[in-house]
Image (cartoon, coloured by chain):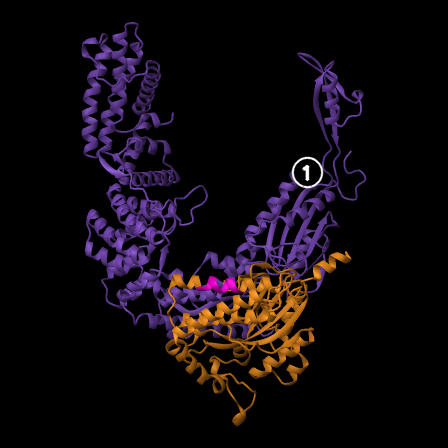
């Protein structure tokens, strides 16, 4: 009843891809740039430079995008109804966080056909911390009838630097949300394209095989020696690019360096899934990735997009 | 005088609401208390007293209402005392400057015994209360003691979540305040979904009434009552019983402004999973209550929504049921999966679970506790093999999937898995019980095998942290060592166990020392543990063990004090030294208490303390001890001779009774001292002129002191 006219006309959002399209349309209307997924493996949409790096510095920023998220350890060979080693997050960054951000978010739920007069929406405390990004924020997980449908975070620090202004980050777990909207208990049963009969393509049609194959790779076959070597290479390259790109005042190669940091993080996740990292080593790896992300964030603040030079020009005016 | 031309009546009501985004449930009660406390303190500091102050919290607001608040703070007249009349010019100038007077004729002159002196009158006129409030509130908001706070947007203000509006009304009128661009007003909003439109209020009654119309129950304790009653009613309708849970109730009250209680169901097939698992899963993830049918868990649950849904809650129930189904399926998967691995086979995996950097892994811990559990089992007369077996398996569930998911099920799951794998039921129960008692109100294990493992676990933990100098200090006790010691004390006392503690403390200290030394060596640091020993009750014992024993004594003191025993009596017993059998110490304290309640006891205490005081003074004066036996030939008076005779007889009788641990008899023996001691002090002058006689009498006093020391150190007893 509170659904948008478009959703109402189609009854409800009925396919996985419509959910994505509706969210993109909605956030585009809120002046977000709609980006495409970052072309690298990462554990969460937060790793996308459009979130991690853009969260820092004084420049306003509004973006929304889908990000495939890879969590090698969460693979279940396609046998678990809710667990996937590859899934989609829909990520929204609003910086500075607008005063009506909660209402904007709730309207996005309406836009995908969730009727807030019949569903119990709740903001439940859930503080966010990413040890590898050296980042934290306060916020909630948003519940719809007891199910977590989004993460809602006010970024306080990234890479150890204060976020000023503060960005509001919204992360929708798309599969879960779609399962909810479609009333489906098994992720692979989701209607992907909205087609009926012969035209219907399910989530399983698209991803079941890949869940099985990647679970084998993640848990059994990934070459750990090679992964460890790649980790060291990525780490070294990141540091080297950060050193070479730094001309003192400004930094000229943050984004390529940060790519290597993303790579290192994913390689660590793969090694972790293969069970070759002991509890004590684990902390060491996390610290090494964090060191890279911190250094990238520091370098970012020396770039134009990171606001370098902006403060001094403001000071000159004021 | 006051409030003549003020727009407020002389006494009025102050209403303040801080309206924000959702405040974490766990922080609400404390925040409401803090708000009332800080506002109350602020008003009092400004000279404003009031009749009552009450505060409330909902997920979106902190509210405080102050009644009977004067419209103005009172005028204050103080006087500042100055120099004497005729004092040097410099003193006078200094006085004028410090009291803000222009000239001496503004000062008044007062007289006291020594003559005239100047006084500067200082007048501080009262201020309108709204001015005071407008000053206090921003300070409170900026310095509010949230456990965690944050910034938002482009602002600098910190609050628990973004602060949206401030309602501040005194006597029906807005108190103008501005904090970081948020201006106060008289408006607030109701329920986020059911009544979001802002409305204005005149005062607290109006506020509370309008909130209720706007689907907000302001008072958290009322929300709890609403939830509890509705849940019970709903359960009763289905012939079920609500499994009450105060923490869960409070959390739900903190998650809702308008609680609506609904019931859902899950597949009966899940009931084959242990009830603790189902209940924990529903509680931890979904904040739902479990229900019981008779003794068993029912396949129903209670959820608390924050909405009166158009469809009567049908969609909400269906949604929650679906989530619960997935959660329970996960739990069932973990349970089935975990049971495929023998607990015993999990033990080596404990090598990966670090208990503490310097104390090693859980695996190393159980290698120590298994031996200690054996020792204790032998001491208390139970099967050492069962105790050791239970100690070996006690931590194995820490590496199970279920406990990984729900840490609070540690022990409970170990028991289920042990039973499933046909371990002895006694062993299985001991695995579940070995963490107990977890708090002062938790039950103490009764089975001897469970007791042995529970004690071994706690003693090893305490000895370990003592070995690395991580003792509790002040309010800091991060490893809950006080709780562990109290747990051990209750295990011993409530089960009536005779366990001389020093031996296990010391033997465990040696084992822990090895682990610590090995780890310290690996870490390349110099060894920090000290193996220094001291003489204790005739043998060599590590100084650390004595220190830990005195920690036990302190905790015992607090435990007994909580139960109404006199702490000075505990001191009087422990100060004897060599006390490491807590049960005996407590029995002695009891007997001593009963004795001191008798007339003989009270009088003997007085006499003994007198003897001790005289000795203390004279020994100090003469710089020597009078600890030699008195010489019978030097006695002059009948009372001295009588006392000397009695003292010898009493001492051997009391010592024999103590030896037999018959403290009542020991006290009865000591009681016989009363009459001769009284008679001695009535008729004998201790500090006689004749030095040898004095010396002898002091030595006799020492005999009183020594004899009473067979039962307690009377010098530690108050009164």
> Where residue B531 sits in the image (x, y, percent)?
29, 41
Left or right of residue B668, residue B160 in this image: right
> What is chain B's hue in the picture?
purple
The quadrant the N terminus of chain B occupies is: top right
Say if the magenta span includes residue A286.
yes
Residue B157 drawn above or below residue B708: below
Q: Main secondary structure of the magenta part?
A: helix
Q: Nearer the viewer, residue B124 or A86?
A: A86
Q: Secondary structure at mark 1?
A: loop
Which residue is located at x 21 percent, y 57 percent? B386
Which of the chains is orange? A
What span is colored magenta in the figure? A285-292
Q: Label 1, on which residue?
A: B46
Q: Is residue B18 magenta?
A: no
Residue A17 visible in the shown view: yes
The image position of residue A200, as x and y in percent, is 53, 90
Residue at left 67%, top 52%? B205
In the displayed structure, would residue B630 be above or below residue B27? Answer: above
């Amino acid at each position: 009843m509170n659904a948008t006219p478009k959703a109402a006309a189609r009854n409800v959002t009925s396919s996985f891809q419509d959910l994505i399209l509706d969210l993109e349309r909605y956030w585009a209307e809120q002046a977000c740039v709609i980006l495409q997924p970052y072309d690298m493996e990462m554990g969460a949409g937060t790793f996308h430079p459009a979130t991690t790096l853009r969260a820092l510095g004084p420049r306003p920023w509004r973006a929304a995008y889908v990000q495939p998220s890879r969590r090698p350890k969460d693979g279940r060979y396609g046998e678990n109804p809710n667990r996937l080693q590859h899934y989609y997050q829909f990520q929204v960054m609003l910086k500075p966080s607008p005063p009506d951000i909660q209402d904007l978010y709730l309207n996005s739920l309406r836009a995908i056909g969730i009727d807030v007069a019949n569903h119990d929406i709740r903001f439940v405390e859930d503080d966010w911390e990413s040890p590898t990004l050296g980042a934290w924020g306060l916020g909630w997980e948003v519940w719809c009838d007891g199910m977590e449908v989004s993460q809602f975070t006010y970024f306080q620090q990234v890479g150890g630097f204060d976020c000023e202004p503060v960005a509001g980050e919204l992360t929708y777990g798309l599969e879960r949300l779609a399962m909810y909207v479609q009333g489906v208990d098994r992720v692979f049963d989701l209607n992907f394209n909205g087609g009926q009969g012969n035209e219907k393509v399910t989530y399983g049609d698209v991803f079941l095989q890949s869940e099985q194959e990647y679970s084998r790779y993640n848990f059994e076959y990934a070459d750990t020696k090679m992964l460890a070597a790649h980790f060291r290479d990525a780490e070294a390259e990141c540091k080297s690019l950060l050193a070479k790109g730094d001309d003192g005042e400004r930094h000229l190669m943050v984004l390529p360096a940060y790519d290597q940091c993303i790579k290192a993080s994913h390689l660590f996740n793969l090694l972790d899934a293969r069970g070759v990292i002991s509890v004590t080593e684990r902390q060491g790896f996390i610290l090494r990735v964090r060191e890279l992300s911190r250094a990238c964030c520091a370098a970012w603040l020396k770039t134009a997009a990171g606001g370098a030079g902006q403060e001094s020009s403001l000071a000159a005016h004021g | 005088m006051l409030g003549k031309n003020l727009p407020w009546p002389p006494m009025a009501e102050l209403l303040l609401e801080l309206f924000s985004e959702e405040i974490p449930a766990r922080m609400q009660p404390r925040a409401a208390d803090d708000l009332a406390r800080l506002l109350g303190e602020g008003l009092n500091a400004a000279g404003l007293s009031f009749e009552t102050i009450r505060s409330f919290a909902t997920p979106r607001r902190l509210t405080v209402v102050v009644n009977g608040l004067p419209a103005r703070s009172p005028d204050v007249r103080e006087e500042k005392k100055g120099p004497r009349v005729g004092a040097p010019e410099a003193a006078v100038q200094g006085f004028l400057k410090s009291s803000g007077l222009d000239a001496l004729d503004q000062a008044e002159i007062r007289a006291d015994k020594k003559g005239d002196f100047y006084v500067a009158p200082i007048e501080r006129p009262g201020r309108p209360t709204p001015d005071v409030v407008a000053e206090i509130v921003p300070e409170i908001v900026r310095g509010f003691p949230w456990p965690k706070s944050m910034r938002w947007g482009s602002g600098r203000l910190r609050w628990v979540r973004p602060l949206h509006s401030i309602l501040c009304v005194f006597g029906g009128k807005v108190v103008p305040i501005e904090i970081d661009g948020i201006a106060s007003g008289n408006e607030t909003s109701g329920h986020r979904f059911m009544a979001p439109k802002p409305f204005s209020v005149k005062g607290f009654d109006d506020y509370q009434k309008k909130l209720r119309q706007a689907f907000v129950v302001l008072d958290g304790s009322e929300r709890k009552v609403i939830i509890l009653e509705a849940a019970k009613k709903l359960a009763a309708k289905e012939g079920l019983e609500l499994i009450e849970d105060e923490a869960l109730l409070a959390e739900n009250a903190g998650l809702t402004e308008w609680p609506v209680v609904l019931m859902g169901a899950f597949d009966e097939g899940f009931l084959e999973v242990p009830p603790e698992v189902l209940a924990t899963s529903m509680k931890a993830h979904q904040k739902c209550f479990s229900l019981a049918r008779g003794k068993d868990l029912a396949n129903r649950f209670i959820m608390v929504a924050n909405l009166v849904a158009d469809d009567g809650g049908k969609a909400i129930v269906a949604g929650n049921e679906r989530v619960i189904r997935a959660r329970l399926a996960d739990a069932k998967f973990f349970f089935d999966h975990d049971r495929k691995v023998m607990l015993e086979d999990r033990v080596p995996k404990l090598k990966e679970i670090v208990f503490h950097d310097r104390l090693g892994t859980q695996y190393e811990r159980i290698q120590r506790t298994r031996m200690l559990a054996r020792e204790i089992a032998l001491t208390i007369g139970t099967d050492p093999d069962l105790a050791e077996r239970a100690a070996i398996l006690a931590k194995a569930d820490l590496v199970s999937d279920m406990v990984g998911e729900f840490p609070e099920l540690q022990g409970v799951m170990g028991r289920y898995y042990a039973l499933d794998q046909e371990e002895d039921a006694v062993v299985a129960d001991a695995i579940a019980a070995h963490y107990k008692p977890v708090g002062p109100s938790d039950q103490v294990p009764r089975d001897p095998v469970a007791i042995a493992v529970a004690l071994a676990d706690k003693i090893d933990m305490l000895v370990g942290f003592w070995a690395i100098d991580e003792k509790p200090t002040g309010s800091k006790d991060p490893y809950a060592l006080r709780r562990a010691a109290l747990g051990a004390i209750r295990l011993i006392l409530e089960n009536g166990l005779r366990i001389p503690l020093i031996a296990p403390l010391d033997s465990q200290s040696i084992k822990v020392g090895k682990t610590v030394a090995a780890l310290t060596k690996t870490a390349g640091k110099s060894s920090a543990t000290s193996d220094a020993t001291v003489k204790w009750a005739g043998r060599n014992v590590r100084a650390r063990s004595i220190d830990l024993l005195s920690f036990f004594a302190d905790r015992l003191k607090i435990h007994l004090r909580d139960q109404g025993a006199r702490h000075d009596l505990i001191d009087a017993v422990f100060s004897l030294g060599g006390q490491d059998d807590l049960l005996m110490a407590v029995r002695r304290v009891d007997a001593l208490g009963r004795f001191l309640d008798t007339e003989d006891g009270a009088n003997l205490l007085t006499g003994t303390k007198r003897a001790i005081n005289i000795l203390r003074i004279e020994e100090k004066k003469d710089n020597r001890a009078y600890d030699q036996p008195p010489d019978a030939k030097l006695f002059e008076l009948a009372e001295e001779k009588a006392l000397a005779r009695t003292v010898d007889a009493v001492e051997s009788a009391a010592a024999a009774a103590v030896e037999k641990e018959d403290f009542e008899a020991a006290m009865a023996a000591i009681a016989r001292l009363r009459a001769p001691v009284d008679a001695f002090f009535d008729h004998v002058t201790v500090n006689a002129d004749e030095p040898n006689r004095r010396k002898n009498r002091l030595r006799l006093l020492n005999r009183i002191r020594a004899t009473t020391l067979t039962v307690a150190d009377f010098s530690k007893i108050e009164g």
